[in-house]
Image (tube, rainbow, N blue to C red):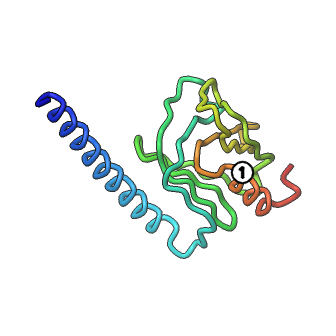
Amino acid sequence: MQIALYVLAGVLLLLVIQRVIIGAFRRHLMKRIQERFAGKGIRRLSLGANFFGQQSRGRGQIRGNGALVLTEDKLCFLLAAPRREYVIPLQQITGVSLPKSHLGKTILRPLLRVDFITVHGPDAIAWALADPDSWAREIEARRPKSAG
């Protein structure tokens, strides 16, 4: 009985620590977003986007959490660690889809995949996030129709 009590206390302590860490993570991301996008017209924001990698960089990338931000003219992802930023101008987006995997990684539910053109050729990035379907619709509605 006493061991079960210690196990329960340990689990509760881990949950509290997890909540504190996630809260600090989100506060840090919000500060970065406020600094980076002040006055730039954020149209949509997710603090819980999980990065599945950039196609041109290959399969060896690890997943990472961060913030996905849609403005009037750009889709931006701020990776929390390592601190990195991906910026895709909406006029360079050639397609948006909802595959269940990207670069050999899956979570068995739809991801938001954005295909785009760079100076080096076509590329793609995918994220797991809440409601990828509505993100896809909004990006499609905002991107110039001549892009693809």
Q: Is residue 69 above or below residue 110?
A: below
Between 140 and 92, the residue placed more toward the observer is 140
Between 4 and 73, the residue placed more toward the observer is 4
In the rendered image, residue 28, in percent from the top left (x then y), is placed at 36, 58
Report how many numbered discs are placed on residues in the image. Answer: 1
Q: Residue at x 64, y 65 (%)?
A: 71
Q: Toward which corner of the image does residue 102 lie, by quadrant? A: top right
In the rendered image, residue 86, in percent from the top left (x then y), is placed at 57, 48
Q: Residue at x 18, y 40 (%)?
A: 9
Q: Considering the numbered disc 1 on the image, is that residue within a helix, a strand or a loop?
A: helix
Extreme-front residue of the structure: 1
In the rendered image, residue 51, in percent from the top left (x then y), is placed at 55, 40
Residue bearing mark 1: 133
In the rendered image, residue 16, in percent from the top left (x then y), is placed at 26, 48
Work out which quarter of the rendered image holds the N terminus and state it. top left
Is disc 1 surrounded by few (<14), some (14 to 19) or many (20+) residues within 10 Å?
some
Q: Amino acid at mark 1?
A: Asp
Between 111 and 34, the residue placed more toward the observer is 111
Extreme-left residue of the structure: 2
Q: Residue at x 57, y 36 (%)?
A: 52
